[in-house]
Amino acid sequence: MSEELIDVLTADGTPTGLRKTKSEIHRDGDWHRAAHVWIVTPDRRVILQLRSKRKANYPGLWDVSSAGHVSAGEAVLDAAIRETAEEIGIDISAGELTPIGTFPEQSVLCGGTYLDNEINEVFLVRKAVGESDVKLQPAEVDAVAFVPIEELRQRIENDPRLVPHREEYELLLRVLTEH
């Protein structure tokens, strides 16, 4: 299977017209887009995914319900839908995705060999799902947890096992507190 192609962006999110493989993007530190989807159940539990220990970046840490790169030529909504189905087996539609923010994020990982310059498009999905609805993609996700909002707040403050998306977590909590 050939490696996924991704559109190269400028730091402000403008497409450059170039496309590179995922490994080239991270080797060269090119800006690119990712879709982050937070799923919240009617009883106000947030789904967190435990990243596979085999992942190059942030292995074995808790993260967004689902997240992934936007493939070359793909719309961000389509990427959000695709990644959620692939990673945790939950089908969502474009109409269920509420955009809540955009965050540029820069990370240098793996001893400087993995340069991650992403523009994260963040969405909220309110959906009645349970643990029996989840089907994990083993290469990407080791487990999920349905976490009450107050527990998520505590984890953000005290748990070093969360992928460092501080600004994004704070926005999510504000949105969930307001509604």
Image: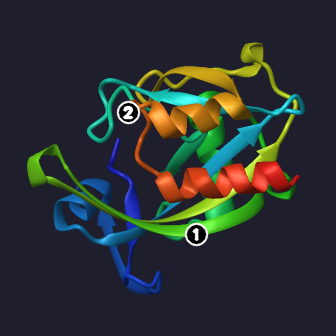
Is 98 left or right of 102, judged from the image as shown? right
Residue 108 location, x and y as percent? Answer: 21, 56
Question: In what element is the residue under mark 1?
Answer: strand
* Residue 123, picture quadrant: bottom right
Q: Position of residue 157 (x, y in %)?
A: 50, 39
Q: Nearer the viewer, residue 154 or 42?
A: 154
Q: Are marks 2 and 1 in contact (CB under 8 Å)?
A: no
Q: CA distance from mark 2 to mark 1?
A: 23 Å
Q: Quadrant of residue 140?
A: top left
Write the residue at 73% across / 16% down: 131
Q: Which quadrant is home to the N terminus? A: top left
For disc 2, the neighbor class at 10 Å (few under 14, some 14 to 19, many from 20) is few
Label 1: how many residues lie within 10 Å, few (<14), some (14-19) or many (20+)? Answer: some
Whole-percent x and y of residue 63? 50, 37
Q: Is residue 75 visible?
A: no
Taking 140 as reference, is 148 left or right?
right
**What residue type is disc 2 on?**
Pro
Residue at image location 10% in from the left, 47% down from the top: 111
For the residue labelled by badge 2, is the local secondary structure a helix, a strand or a loop?
A: loop
Depicted 163 relative to depicted 138: above or below = below
Looking at marks 2 and 1 on the same chain, the residue that comes earlier in the sequence is marked by: 1
> Mark 1 = which residue?
102
Three-letter code, disc 1? Thr
| Residue behind mark 2 | 160
* Front one among 8 and 57: 57
